[in-house]
Structures are given as C-alpha cells and as structure tokens.
Image: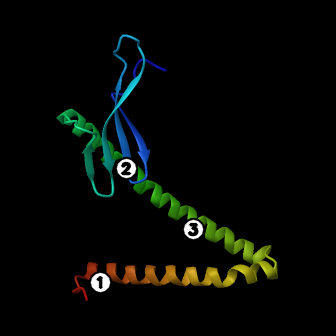
Amino acid sequence: MGADLPDYYFRVRDNGALVFRVDTANRQRRIEMDQIAVVNLKKGEIKPHGDRALSPEDLAEIEAWMAERAEILAQRDIDDIFRAVDYMNATTQWAQSTAADEQLEAVTDTLLLAMHDLRTVLVRKKAERMLKERGAPDE
C-alpha cells in the first residue's frame, strides 16, 4: 500500500456507507480503520457510530462524499437507461431476424405489457412537462 492513504474510507452498502477514519500513524505502522459513522443516502442521515462525536472536518468529508456518491449513482441510473435502450434495440433485431416462433411466443405478451406500461408512463410524464412549460395549471 502506498503511504498516501486517504484520511477516510467509505465502505459502500445499500443506501449509504459505513465511514471509517484511517490511521497509519501508530507504532506498528499498521493501517487501522476506526468506524466513526453510518451514512444513509436516501434519508440524508449521518449517524455517529457508538458514543462518538463527529468533528466539523468529519462532517465536511462525509457530506462531500455523500454529494459525490449521489452524483455517481445518478449517472449510473442514466447509463442503465441508455443500456436498456440498447437492449431493446437488440431485442428488436433478435425478434426480426433470429427468434424462433416458440421463443417469440414465450416472451411476446410479457414484452408487450412492459412496453405498454413504459409507453403509458413516458407519454403521461411528457404531457406533464409540456403543460408545466406552458404554465398550465396542474390538475
């Protein structure tokens, strides 16, 4: 490991992370990680671990990580959607060129329902945005 370790380590988990303070300034020159907090991104919560009091520096580092992590997750969501578009195109090509009748029979109803559901939501959301842009009152 390099000598320039960060002061904090965030162990990512569902909805947030466990936050550790990294310490290499000890007599054994070992890396010690001391848990200082638990972060819940969905709720925006930072809970000190045990009886700890978090310093302003701790809170600033954690809040900066939370903002960066939220941005990363938002980018991943959009990337997943674009990947879904690619899958839809690949599925269309498969259905058009290589799918056997039995394969199409197995997936057609499920795909049609999912596409109908998606289309309904997208059309409704687009209409809401258009009304909002025109300044029309919400219903």
Q: Position of residue 7 (x, y in %)?
A: 33, 28
Gap in angstroms between the C-alphas marked 2 and 3: 28 Å
Task: Give the labeled residue for mark 3.
Answer: 85
Mark 1 or mark 3: which comes first in sequence? 3
Q: Earlier in the sequence, mark 2 or mark 3?
A: 2
Relative to 55, say whether 67 is above or below. below
Q: Is residue 88 left or right of residue 95?
A: left
Query: Height in image: 85 above or below 11?
Result: below
Extreme residue toward the bottom, this view: 139
Q: Position of residue 43 (x, y in %)?
A: 29, 57
Nearer to me, 1 or 129: 1
Determine the residue positioned at 46% across, 59% down: 77
Disc 1 to disc 3, C-alpha distance: 26 Å
Q: Contact, CB < 8 Å: mark 1 with mark 2?
A: no
Disc 2 marks a residue whose amino acid type is: Gly
Q: Residue furthest top?
A: 27
Front-most of residues 138 and 59: 59
Q: Residues within 10 Å of mark 3 (few under 14, many from 20)?
A: few
Q: Are marks 1 and 3 in contact (CB under 8 Å)?
A: no
User: Helix or strand or loop: what does disc 1 sit on?
Assistant: helix
Q: Earlier in the sequence, mark 1 or mark 2?
A: 2
For label 2, the crowd category at 10 Å Cα-Cα, with few meaning under 14, some 14 to 19 and many 20 or more, is: many
Give the foreground label among 2 and 3. Answer: 2
Disc 2 secondary structure class: strand
Could you say where residue 55 lies in the image, as x and y percent from the top left? 19, 34
Distance between mark 1 and mark 2 Cα atoms: 36 Å
Q: Which residue is mark 1?
A: 131
Task: In the rendered view, tell whether residue 103 sits above or below residue 58.
Answer: below
Image point (41%, 13%), residue name = 29
Q: Which residue is mark 2?
A: 16
Q: How many marks?
A: 3
The image quadrant that residue 98 belongs to is: bottom right
